[in-house]
Image (tube, rainbow, N blue to C red):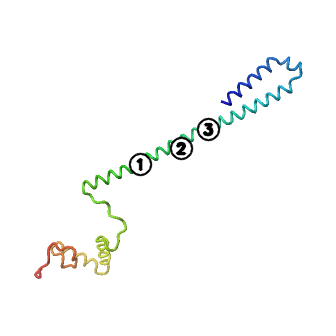
Amino acid sequence: MKQQMALGALNGHVAEMCGGHTIVTAFGHEAKSVATFEKLNEDYYDGAWRAQFVTGIIWPTMMFVGNIGYVLVAVIGGVLVTRAVDRHRRRAGVHPVRPAVLDADHPAERHRQRDSADDGVGGARVRAARRAGRNAGCRERDGDRRHRAAPCSSTT
Protein backbone atom coordinates (compact mmCIF):
# COMPACT_ATOMS: atom_id res chain seq x y z
CA MET A 1 0.00 0.00 0.00
CA LYS A 2 2.83 2.36 0.91
CA GLN A 3 4.52 1.56 -2.41
CA GLN A 4 1.45 2.55 -4.44
CA MET A 5 0.90 5.78 -2.48
CA ALA A 6 4.56 6.76 -2.88
CA LEU A 7 4.44 5.92 -6.59
CA GLY A 8 1.36 8.15 -7.06
CA ALA A 9 3.02 11.07 -5.25
CA LEU A 10 6.21 10.63 -7.26
CA ASN A 11 4.31 10.48 -10.58
CA GLY A 12 2.31 13.58 -9.64
CA HIS A 13 5.44 15.54 -8.79
CA VAL A 14 7.20 14.51 -12.01
CA ALA A 15 4.12 15.40 -14.11
CA GLU A 16 3.85 18.86 -12.51
CA MET A 17 7.56 19.57 -12.84
CA CYS A 18 7.66 18.48 -16.50
CA GLY A 19 4.45 20.34 -17.38
CA GLY A 20 5.53 23.53 -15.61
CA HIS A 21 9.20 23.30 -16.48
CA THR A 22 9.43 26.82 -17.81
CA ILE A 23 7.79 28.29 -14.70
CA VAL A 24 10.04 26.24 -12.35
CA THR A 25 13.17 27.44 -14.13
CA ALA A 26 11.89 31.02 -14.39
CA PHE A 27 11.41 31.31 -10.63
CA GLY A 28 14.55 29.26 -9.73
CA HIS A 29 12.83 26.36 -7.99
CA GLU A 30 14.99 23.63 -9.56
CA ALA A 31 16.87 22.82 -6.32
CA LYS A 32 13.62 22.67 -4.34
CA SER A 33 12.05 20.43 -7.01
CA VAL A 34 15.06 18.06 -7.01
CA ALA A 35 14.99 17.83 -3.17
CA THR A 36 11.27 17.00 -3.25
CA PHE A 37 11.87 14.41 -5.97
CA GLU A 38 14.69 12.74 -3.97
CA LYS A 39 12.47 12.56 -0.84
CA LEU A 40 9.55 11.07 -2.81
CA ASN A 41 11.90 8.68 -4.62
CA GLU A 42 13.38 7.48 -1.27
CA ASP A 43 9.86 6.84 0.11
CA TYR A 44 8.99 4.88 -3.03
CA TYR A 45 12.23 2.84 -2.78
CA ASP A 46 11.51 1.86 0.85
CA GLY A 47 7.94 0.83 0.05
CA ALA A 48 8.98 -1.13 -3.06
CA TRP A 49 11.79 -2.93 -1.22
CA ARG A 50 9.44 -4.03 1.59
CA ALA A 51 6.79 -5.16 -0.89
CA GLN A 52 9.33 -7.19 -2.87
CA PHE A 53 10.72 -8.73 0.33
CA VAL A 54 7.28 -9.85 1.55
CA THR A 55 6.40 -11.15 -1.91
CA GLY A 56 9.66 -13.12 -2.04
CA ILE A 57 9.05 -14.67 1.39
CA ILE A 58 5.44 -15.76 0.78
CA TRP A 59 6.16 -18.55 -1.74
CA PRO A 60 8.88 -20.41 0.24
CA THR A 61 6.80 -20.07 3.41
CA MET A 62 3.75 -21.58 1.74
CA MET A 63 5.85 -24.42 0.31
CA PHE A 64 7.26 -25.12 3.77
CA VAL A 65 3.79 -25.18 5.34
CA GLY A 66 2.60 -27.49 2.56
CA ASN A 67 5.52 -29.85 3.13
CA ILE A 68 4.86 -29.92 6.88
CA GLY A 69 1.26 -30.82 6.11
CA TYR A 70 2.42 -33.62 3.80
CA VAL A 71 4.76 -35.02 6.47
CA LEU A 72 2.04 -34.89 9.12
CA VAL A 73 -0.42 -36.71 6.86
CA ALA A 74 2.20 -39.37 6.06
CA VAL A 75 3.16 -39.90 9.73
CA ILE A 76 -0.40 -39.97 11.03
CA GLY A 77 -1.45 -42.25 8.18
CA GLY A 78 1.45 -44.61 8.94
CA VAL A 79 0.53 -44.75 12.61
CA LEU A 80 -3.12 -45.44 11.81
CA VAL A 81 -2.20 -48.17 9.32
CA THR A 82 0.11 -49.92 11.78
CA ARG A 83 -2.58 -49.78 14.46
CA ALA A 84 -5.10 -51.26 12.05
CA VAL A 85 -2.66 -54.02 11.02
CA ASP A 86 -1.95 -54.86 14.66
CA ARG A 87 -5.68 -54.91 15.44
CA HIS A 88 -6.27 -57.16 12.43
CA ARG A 89 -3.47 -59.53 13.49
CA ARG A 90 -4.87 -59.77 17.00
CA ARG A 91 -8.34 -60.59 15.64
CA ALA A 92 -6.88 -63.20 13.28
CA GLY A 93 -4.79 -64.76 16.04
CA VAL A 94 -1.46 -63.97 14.39
CA HIS A 95 1.28 -63.49 16.94
CA PRO A 96 3.48 -60.41 16.70
CA VAL A 97 7.00 -60.68 15.36
CA ARG A 98 9.50 -62.21 17.80
CA PRO A 99 11.62 -59.54 19.48
CA ALA A 100 15.19 -59.30 18.24
CA VAL A 101 16.70 -59.44 21.74
CA LEU A 102 15.57 -62.30 23.94
CA ASP A 103 16.44 -62.91 27.54
CA ALA A 104 18.31 -66.12 28.42
CA ASP A 105 15.20 -67.75 29.92
CA HIS A 106 13.16 -67.42 26.75
CA PRO A 107 12.56 -70.86 25.10
CA ALA A 108 13.71 -69.65 21.68
CA GLU A 109 16.95 -68.34 23.16
CA ARG A 110 17.62 -71.65 24.98
CA HIS A 111 16.99 -73.51 21.71
CA ARG A 112 19.45 -71.23 19.88
CA GLN A 113 22.08 -71.71 22.59
CA ARG A 114 21.65 -75.47 22.47
CA ASP A 115 22.03 -75.52 18.68
CA SER A 116 25.12 -73.31 18.79
CA ALA A 117 26.63 -75.63 21.43
CA ASP A 118 26.10 -78.53 19.00
CA ASP A 119 28.22 -76.81 16.36
CA GLY A 120 31.40 -78.38 17.77
CA VAL A 121 33.19 -81.47 16.49
CA GLY A 122 30.29 -83.89 16.92
CA GLY A 123 27.58 -81.29 16.41
CA ALA A 124 26.37 -82.65 13.09
CA ARG A 125 25.98 -86.15 14.57
CA VAL A 126 24.08 -84.82 17.58
CA ARG A 127 21.70 -82.84 15.38
CA ALA A 128 21.20 -85.82 13.07
CA ALA A 129 20.47 -88.06 16.05
CA ARG A 130 17.95 -85.53 17.35
CA ARG A 131 16.20 -85.42 14.00
CA ALA A 132 16.18 -89.20 13.77
CA GLY A 133 14.76 -89.45 17.27
CA ARG A 134 12.00 -86.99 16.47
CA ASN A 135 11.19 -88.88 13.31
CA ALA A 136 10.97 -92.15 15.22
CA GLY A 137 8.42 -90.63 17.59
CA CYS A 138 10.68 -90.68 20.66
CA ARG A 139 11.78 -87.24 21.69
CA GLU A 140 13.09 -88.04 25.14
CA ARG A 141 15.88 -90.29 23.92
CA ASP A 142 17.97 -87.42 22.53
CA GLY A 143 17.89 -85.36 25.69
CA ASP A 144 15.24 -82.98 24.41
CA ARG A 145 12.98 -83.14 27.47
CA ARG A 146 10.80 -80.19 26.47
CA HIS A 147 8.76 -82.35 24.08
CA ARG A 148 7.14 -85.31 25.83
CA ALA A 149 4.59 -86.15 23.21
CA ALA A 150 5.76 -89.77 22.76
CA PRO A 151 7.66 -91.17 25.75
CA CYS A 152 10.42 -93.62 24.93
CA SER A 153 10.14 -97.26 25.64
CA SER A 154 13.16 -99.27 26.63
CA THR A 155 12.87 -101.44 23.48
CA THR A 156 13.42 -98.67 20.91
Pointer 2 residue: 64
Q: Quadrant of residue 114?
A: bottom left
The quarter of the picture where residue 14 lies is top right
Q: Is residue 133 left or right of residue 2?
A: left
Q: Position of residue 85 (x, y in %)?
A: 32, 52
Foreground disc of the pair 1, 3: 1
**Which residue lies under the disc numbered 1?**
76
Residue plotted at (32% across, 64% down)? 98
* C-alpha span from label 3 to label 2: 14 Å
**Please, is residue 131 above or below residue 79 in the view?**
below
Q: Quadrant of residue 34?
A: top right
- Location of residue 152 in the rendering, given as x and y in whole percent from the top left corner: 14, 78
Q: Which residue, given by chain and number where applicable, does mark 3 sit on? A: 56
Please say if 43 is above or below 145.
Answer: above
Inspect the image, locate mark 1, and give the three-letter code of the amino acid beneath it. Answer: Ile
Camera-side mark, 2 or 1: 1
Q: Are marks 1 and 3 in contact (CB under 8 Å)?
A: no
Viewed as shown, does residue 73 lie left or right of 153?
Answer: right
Q: Residues within 10 Å of mark 2 (few under 14, many from 20)?
A: few
Residue name at image x 73 percent, y 25 percent: 9
- Quarter occupied by the C terminus: bottom left
| Mark toward the start of the polypeptide (1 vs 3) | 3
Q: Secondary structure at mark 1?
A: helix
Which amino acid type is shown beneath numbered disc 3?
Answer: Gly
Please tell me which residue lies in front, 155 or 68. Answer: 68
Give, as a three-letter code, the residue at label 2.
Answer: Phe
As rendered, which of 85 and 133 lies closer to the eye? 85
